[in-house]
Amino acid sequence: MSDLYRCLPAVDRVLDHLGKEPALSLVPRPLLKDLVNTFLELRRKDIAAGRITDARELAEERLYVDMQAFVRAGVAPRFRRVLNATGVVVHTNLGRSLLAREAVQAVNEACAHYSNLEFDLRTGKRGSRYSHVEELLRRITGAEAALVVNNNAAAVLLTLETLASGQEVIISRGQLVEIGGSFRIPDVMAKSGAVLREVGATNRTHLYDYEQAVNENTGALMRVHTSNFRVIGFTKDVSLVELRNLADHHHLPVIEDLGSGALVRLSGLDGEPLVQEVVRDGADVVTFSGDKVLGGPQAGIIVGRTEYVERIKRNPMNRAMRIDKMTLAALEATLRLCLDPEQARQAVPTLRMISTPFETLKSRAGRLARLLRTELGESAVVGTRKDESRVGGGAFPEKGLPTVLVEVTPCSCSVDALRDALLHVDPPLVGRVERGALCLDPRTLEGEEFALVAKAIKAALIGPDSEFSF
């Protein structure tokens, strides 16, 4: 056993060897040293446990190959690119909406150079960061004023704290939704200082429920669009127009939380009102997300009447929730595209993926299947079948998008083992496991990613890294 320990190289010698690798030459030496020490310690444990008994297993040519793979995995960024083959377009766990090319370029400019973030180029004096997007939001939605914060939960919290702290906010019981991460409307309302006054039943709420609840302590009437679920059957809801009339009678503001706010109509998908329609129907304040079906960066957008939005802007909490320059740049570029709905449907990835015709997906699935059959050979059976994609992000929960899946059934391992192995390739690939096969949906894969998909699956099934156990 002592002879085996002596086969392990000195750390400095290993570092000198790894330093010659172009991919590792810029890695900080302290990090490399830590990884090398960890690797060598694992090998010592293998010797002590009797898992390594032959000196040939510690030969330099073999040891360095294993070590390079271990070190590359150790220095890889923790936040990294993932191939999304799930067919869920706005995938909450995989980064939600992809940015349009124009938005990516805008972010690069904002990061690489100084900018007029809070500098008015007309006057040469301090300006407002919100001015870069407020005019665009007013133009698209028809609202009098606009404000952007870091996400929609913040937008709701800030709005309620400003307009109704210490007062009652009346809301239908059927609209007390829970959003991602177990955040619930009642909890957000409680943190704002507003007092929840729920009315009606889970499935039916009438105008008289609101009328009977209004009193001298009422601060606002609120509607929450149930974008992530639907109540069907024996149901009744109060329209925004009806609520607007009641609010006018009592001089109260109407707050509408859309959650997932759409600016562009998508063919075949109904049930999700456009922000501009809600503004037109009389909401005083509308809140919605920037990174769902709008197709932009994570942001919480507030639009509405000037008297209310200006009050929200002056709230000291606003500074804690403001967006940074990268978000601002990406949002402005996305909103510019939304000025022309047809252009937005082509240029904004989220909108383009949702709108992709079935025949196009069928053709792309066929192309991907042919590529996989060529690359995987007898290691897997590849086929196609019709199924459905999902919008995701809590939008259109009852609407499936017709698609064609590519099914990969491995011949030498279980599909669960293949799914797990694909999480450790570069870049990782995430698909769906259904009917004993790995299912890949071309809706959420760009054409140029097909080669990466084939490489990933091949590496997971028969690739050179499959023999190493790190």
Image: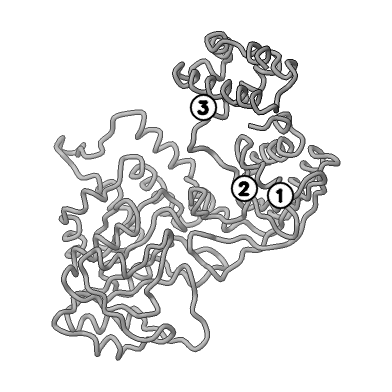
- What residue is shown at x 48% (from left), y 38% (from top)? 79
| Residue 75's disc number | 3
Secondary element at tag 2: strand
Disc 2: which residue = 430
Residue drawn at x 21%, y 36% as measured from the top left: 121
Work out whether 16 lies above or below 408: above
Alpha carbon distance from label 3 to label 2: 22 Å
Q: Are marks 1 and 2 in contact (CB under 8 Å)?
A: no
Percent across and percent down for residue 48 are: 64, 25
Q: CA distance from mark 3 to mark 1?
A: 35 Å
**Badge 1 is on which residue?**
364
Q: Amino acid at mark 2?
A: Val
Q: Residue 449, percent across and down?
A: 64, 40
Residue 182 position by quadrant: bottom left
At 53% from the left and 60% from the top, the residue drawn is: 392
Work out which quarter of the rendered image holds the C terminus and state it.
Answer: top right
State the residue in front, 67 or 370. 67
Disc nearest the viewer among 3 and 1: 3
The N terminus - image quarter: top right
Camera-nearest residue between 396 and 182:
182
Work out whether 430 lies above or below 141: above
- Residue 140 picture location, percent across and down: 36, 59
